[in-house]
Amino acid sequence: MSHRRGSEVVADARYDAADGGALPPLVPEEVELLKARITFDITAKFTDRQRVLLAAAGAVPLALLVGFEVGEGATAVVRTGAVWAAVMALVPLGLAVNRRYRAEYAARLEAAGYTTVTDPSGRLRYVPPGGQLPGHGNPLA
């Protein structure tokens, strides 16, 4: 078995962590790249329009809970509407933060030599140099 240490591949003894043996050493740069790849995938999962629709749908139960907890009748309806509007006013901030994270992690991945590919569902993904999307290889080759 081999593992990567920096840019070199090092051969070593088999790691039998399941039997209480040692785990392979972690390479901090590789962990950070994996974190960047996962974060990019999460931030690119939905379009901005889908995020707005999800926020609007998620804000309704929250607004109903808060609005009817504080009052009843017309006052509760007005407070429910105010809470919903307040939550929806925060949506553009959330979209901006998401775009910033996506751009930051995309820059890290590109600097490390990752390339962009479009998966079958149309989402932009990053793959390591010489890599491919999961499930697109021939396991019998």
Image (spheres, rainbow, N blue to C red):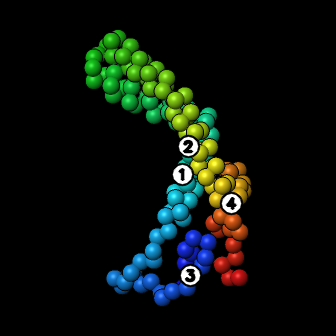
Q: Residues within 10 Å of mark 3 (few under 14, many from 20)?
A: few
Count of all numbered marks drawn on residues in the image: 4
Q: Are the residues tagged 4 and 2 within 8 Å (C-beta)?
A: no
Identify whether 38 is placed above or below 59.
below
Q: Quadrant of the C terminus?
A: bottom right
> Which residue shows up at 56% across the image and 34% down it?
95
Please tell me whether mark 3 sits on a helix, a strand or a loop.
strand
Which label is found at residue 10?
3
The residue to which callout 4 is attached is: 113
Nearer to us: label 1 or label 3: 3
> Of marks 1 and 3, which one's residue comes earlier in the chain?
3
Gap in Å between the C-alphas at discs 1 and 3? 28 Å
Q: Residues within 10 Å of mark 4 (few under 14, many from 20)?
A: few
Q: Residue furthest bottom?
A: 13
Q: Are the residues tagged 1 and 3 within 8 Å (C-beta)?
A: no
Please tell me whether mark 4 sits on a helix, a strand or a loop.
loop
Identify whether 34 is placed above or below 81.
below
The residue to which callout 2 is attached is: 101
Identify whether 3 is placed above or below 114.
below
Gap in Å between the C-alphas at discs 4 and 1? 17 Å
The residue to which callout 1 is attached is: 39
> Of marks 3 and 4, which one's residue comes earlier in the chain?
3
Q: Are the residues tagged 1 and 2 within 8 Å (C-beta)?
A: yes
> Which residue shows up at 64% across the image and 49% down it?
107
> Of marks 1 and 2, which one's residue comes earlier in the chain?
1
